[in-house]
Amino acid sequence: MEFVAKTLFGLEEVLAQELKDLGAQNVQPLKRAVSFEGDLKVMYTANLYCRLAIKILTPIYEFQASDERQLYDQVKAFDWTKWIAVDQTFAIDGTVNSDFFSHSKYVALKMKDAVVDQIRDRKGRRPSVDTTHPDIMLNLRVFKDQCTVSFDTSGELLNRRGYRGRGHLAPLNEVLAAGMLKLSGWTPERPLHDLMCGTGTFLLEAAMMAANMPAGVFRRKFGFVSWQHHDPVMWNDIRKQSSASINYDPKVNLYGGDKDNRSVNAALASARLLRLEKKVKIERKLFDQQEPQAFSGMIISNPPYGERMPKTDIEAFYSLVGDTLKKKFSGYEAWLISSNVSAMKHIGLRPSRKITLYNGALECKFQKYELYSGTKKARSAQ
Ligand SMILES: C[S@@+](CC[C@H](N)C(=O)[O-])C[C@H]1O[C@@H](n2cnc3c(N)ncnc32)[C@H](O)[C@@H]1O
């Protein structure tokens, strides 16, 4: 079977490697996506384990259309009764990159009309649409006049791991956080410190990696359970095996601090839910009052971007981040992400790597700083 795993900009290569490690074949990085082949077992495993995919689609129908009438007729020509039962709910998610069609919501609506009309004509009743918790989630992608309909095997987005309680303040997307850990080259042997951990996304993702805990361990529902090809026995076996291979006592050193009490409490609650609270130390503390927890390790942080702060204040903030790194964390490697590139210059350290990523719609730089004691010149002369 063919699949397309959707991801975020910049994570295509690391997702491709993750899929290969999970047994996928013919893995090809695309733009914000990776295509691969595999059987049912690979698809179940990828949905359960993938930390770097947002959703996994399987194409079921391709056609050409250059106006809405053609789109309606072509959709109606496919036998939807094999995919959607009258008592199931469904939803269609559309993406458009075409001169023939301009609105993704409109093409999805046209497709919905054709699906409903056909099932009503054939069965006398029609399935309902449910955009929040549908049984069957379909995806329509229109590129020029090429239309691809895919079945969404994931259903709810895979970044929704299920470890967050309610009322979280704008945390980092879990897929982005896991992808940044991979891009940085972090492995569980390396002490990890987040100076402004907020709700703890980096630390929670790192803890799950160290524990070999599947990303989807808390998800109750996946799109494929309503699929005609679903094999519940195989799926239960995969789930059971994955639970048995979790190590709740991994050797890992994870530390985070944040000035905001509510965020710290939310991070601790998530760690407890994962049953990894003994592995993640999180405190309410300003970043410049935090101390290294190891001789040498890695810092990964997502400081405020300062959209609502005066320019001089955010520059002074980044300057204090730079001073803290230099004074306290020599021997560490630090990775910071921010959309505020001009404020990042006030860190006062030369980045040894710069990676472009997007945090939602914001273009960001994810930068690496080597924190040598003394100057780099003095170190290389040693
Ligand atoms: C962009 S958010 C980080 C979000 C986090 N990565 C998450 O996934 O929830 C920035 C964080 O910096 C924290 N912060 C701001 N100033 C701070 C300071 N002086 N010391 C420690 N934390 C600070 C804020 O409370 C906020 O949680």
Image (cartoon, grey):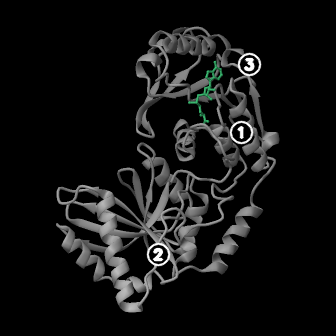
- Amino acid identity at mark 1: Ala
Q: Quadrant of the N terminus?
A: bottom left
Residue corresponding to mark 3: 291
Front position among marks 1 and 3: 1
Q: In the image, which is nearer the foreground, mark 1 or mark 2?
A: 2
Q: Earlier in the sequence, mark 1 or mark 2?
A: 2
Quadrant location, the C terminus: top right
Callout 1: few (<14), some (14-19), or many (20+) C-alpha neighbours within 10 Å? Answer: many
Q: CA distance from mark 1 to mark 3?
A: 22 Å
Task: Kindly identify the amino acid type of the residue bearing the numbered disc 3.
Answer: Glu
Where does the image place residue 192, in percent across and percent down from the top left? Answer: 67, 32
Where 163 sits versus 60, above or below? above
- Residue 131 placement, left or right of 212: left
Q: Do the residues under discs 1 and 2 have CB atoms within 8 angstroms? A: no
Mark 2, other Cα within 10 Å: few <14 / some 14–19 / many ≥20: some
Alpha-carbon span between mark 1 and mark 2: 37 Å
**Residue located 55% across and 14% down the image:** 317
Image coords of residue 135 (percent x, y): 53, 72
Q: Which residue in the protein does label 2 denote?
A: 128
Give the side of residue 349 with respect to residue 108, left or right.
right
The residue at 70%/63% (across/down) is: 242
Q: Nearer the viewer, residue 300 or 191?
A: 300
Q: Mark 1 highlights which residue?
A: 266
Q: Secondary structure at mark 1?
A: helix
